[in-house]
Image (cartoon, rainbow, N blue to C red):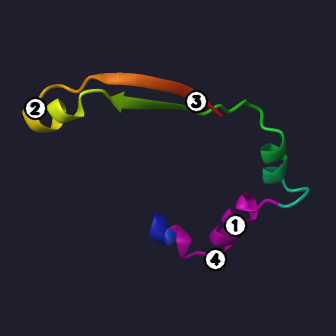
């Protein structure tokens, strides 16, 4: 289905027109003032027993660092 649609030139044209950001386009308006606040939360975990985990097969003991919110 995707191969058939991508071989039709007007479908490619419509997709590219809606993906491009330029002043006055609908996609630019949504990008400039999104309707939903988007937050990204990043959690990082530190393995506190790396030697025992790697060499002895123990379960890793994890220390959570974060979240970092952007």
**Which region shows up in magenta?**
5-21
Residue position marked by numbered label 1 in the rendering: 16
Look at mark 3 in the image and give the residue it sits on.
Answer: 68
Position of the C terminus, as image quadrant, is: top right
How far apart, in angstroms, are the residues tagged by discs 2 and 4?
56 Å
* Secondary structure under the numbered disc 1 in the rendered image: helix
- Mark pair 3, 4: CA separation: 43 Å
27 left or right, relative to 44: right
Check if mark 3's residue and mark 1's residue have beta carbons within 8 Å.
Answer: no
Which mark sits nearer the N-terminus, 4 or 1? 4
Q: Residue furthest right?
A: 24
Q: Magenta stretch mostly in which secondary structure?
A: helix
Residue located at (54% from left, 68% from top): 5
Query: Which picture quadrant has residue 37?
Result: top right
Picture layout, residue 21 above or below residue 44: below
**Looking at the image, is 33 positioned above or below residue 61?**
below
Task: Give the secondary structure at mark 4.
Answer: helix
User: Above or below — where is 37 with respect to 6?
Assistant: above
Q: The residue tagged with tag 2: helix, strand or loop? A: loop
Question: How far is disc 2 from disc 3 in space, using C-alphas?
Answer: 30 Å
Image position, residue 45 (x, y; %): 39, 30
Count of marks, rendered view: 4
Q: Which mark is residue 50?
A: none
Q: Tell me residue 2's x, y (percent).
A: 47, 64
How crowded is the residue under tag 4: few (<14 C-alpha within 10 Å), some, or many (20+)?
few
Numbered label attached to residue 57: 2
Structural distance between the alpha carbons of marks 1 and 2: 51 Å
| For the residues bearing labels 1 and 2, Cβ distance under 8 angstroms | no
Cα gap from disc 4 to disc 1, whole angstroms: 11 Å
């Amino acid at each position: 289905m995707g191969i058939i649609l991508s071989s039709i030139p007007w479908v490619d044209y419509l997709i590219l027109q809606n993906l491009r950001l330029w002043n006055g386009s609908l996609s630019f308006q949504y990008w400039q003032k999104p309707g939903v606040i988007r937050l990204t939360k990043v959690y990082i975990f530190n393995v506190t027993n790396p030697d025992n985990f790697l060499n002895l097969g123990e379960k890793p003991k994890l220390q959570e660092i974060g979240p970092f919110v952007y």
